[in-house]
Amino acid sequence: MKLEWFFSVEPGLFVEGLGGFRHSDTIVVTKDGMEPLTYYPRDLESLIIT
């Protein structure tokens, strides 16, 4: 990876006959590692849609 490269990290979970969930984070590579560009609550309860 190179400095100032941008990435989209999109893990997904799919259950046959039920549905699926995909979550996306955008990050940029910095001189100190990486910086997330997508800010949202990261606790599980905030990610549940009912």
Image: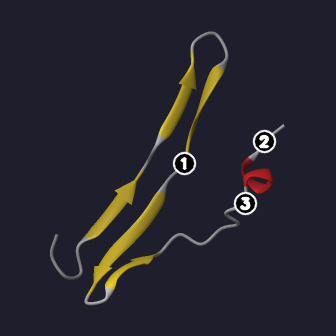
Q: State the image coordinates of residue 22 (x, y, percent, origin top left).
A: 54, 41
Marks 1 and 2 sit apart, C-alpha to C-alpha, by 12 Å
Residue shown at the point (72%, 51%) measured from the top left: 47
Looking at the image, is 4 positioned above or below residue 15?
Answer: below
User: Furthest-bottom residue in view?
Assistant: 31
Q: In which quarter of the image is residue 5?
A: bottom left
Residue shown at the point (54%, 32%) measured from the top left: 13
Residue 23, label in figure: 1
Looking at the image, is 15 positioned above or below residue 23?
Answer: above
Q: Which of 5 and 31 is in front in this view?
A: 31
Q: What element carries label 1?
A: loop
Q: In the rendered image, which quarter contains the C terminus?
A: top right
Query: Sequence order check: which comes first, mark 1 or mark 2?
Result: 1
Q: Name the residue under label 2.
A: 49
Q: Mark 3 points at which residue?
A: 43
Query: Sequence order check: which comes first, mark 2 or mark 3?
Result: 3
Q: In the rendered image, which quarter contains the N terminus?
A: bottom left
Q: State the image coordinates of residue 32 (x, y, percent, origin top left).
A: 31, 89
The type of residue carrying mark 1 is: His
Query: Sequence order check: which comes first, mark 3 or mark 1?
Result: 1
Q: What element carries label 2?
A: loop
Q: Count neighbours of disc 3 (C-alpha within 10 A) and say few if under 14, some if 14 to 19, many if 20 or more.
A: few
